[in-house]
Amino acid sequence: MVSTILNFIYLLSLVCWVGSIIFFSFFVAPVVFKTLDREKAGEVVGIVFPRYYKLGYVCGALILLCFLLSGDVGLKWCAWGIMILGSGLAGLVINPKAKKLKEELKISSEDEKPALEAKFKTLHSLSVKLNAVVLFSGLWLLGLTASNFQL
């Protein structure tokens, strides 16, 4: 019974985390940026990001708990570690820096804007790459899980 509950929590956490990345990256963000002007779209995404990252942290913590309680998980540790590291870097380091740059852009002079925009573009690019790494690591973890799965 305990094993079944752990498996359920693990699978639910993994599919919520991977699913949220897919939904946000391929559905929400493109629609928001096509529908709204760039500044408003950025504001909307800025509001969503903290919740997006929190979901990853909660799912990552639940997966870790399941790993610790279930014992040997082999390569799954590696995939999970990449996911949590990528999410942590994006959510706790890159996102706050990008948010701060956006605020600086609003009050900056015309001379300062190009340099700030270049810094923001670099941070955004890094954030997108980290998101892709987390997604592919999540798919890897899902594949490792499916290889042992039985109906």
Image (cartoon, grey):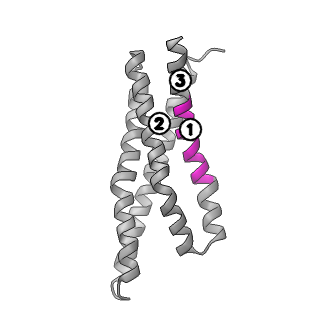
- Secondary structure mostly taken by the magenta-highlighted segment of the chain: helix
The location of residue 52, given as percent across then percent down, is 49, 50
Residue drawn at the location 56% of the way across and 38% of the way down: 16
Q: Secondary structure at mark 1?
A: helix
Q: Secondary structure at mark 2?
A: helix
Examine the image and state in which quarter residue 30 appears. Answer: bottom right
Residue drawn at the location 37% of the way across and 82% of the way down: 107
Quote the CA–CA distance across marks 2 and 3. 16 Å
Q: In terms of depth relative to the viewer, which is nearer, 73 or 136?
A: 73
The residue that label 1 is drawn on is 16
Tell me, yes or no, if residue 75 can be seen here. no
What's under tag 3, amino acid-wise?
Answer: Thr
Q: Is residue 111 above or below residue 101?
A: below
Residue numbers of the magenta segment: 12-26
Examine the image and state in which quarter residue 149 appears. Answer: top right
Camera-side mark, 2 or 3: 2
Q: Are marks 1 and 2 in contact (CB under 8 Å)?
A: yes
Q: Are marks 1 and 3 in contact (CB under 8 Å)?
A: no
Indicate whether residue 16 is drawn in magenta.
yes
What's under tag 1, amino acid-wise?
Answer: Cys
Q: In terms of depth relative to the viewer, which is nearer, 73 or 2?
A: 2
Left or right of 69 in this view: 5: right
Q: Upstream in the sequence, badge 2 or badge 3? A: 2
Q: Upstream in the sequence, badge 1 or badge 3? A: 1
The residue that label 3 is drawn on is 145
Q: Is residue 17 above or below residue 114?
A: above
The residue that label 2 is drawn on is 59
Q: Is residue 28 above or below residue 67?
A: below
On-image quarter of the C terminus: top right
What's under tag 2, amino acid-wise?
Answer: Cys
Camera-side mark, 1 or 3: 1
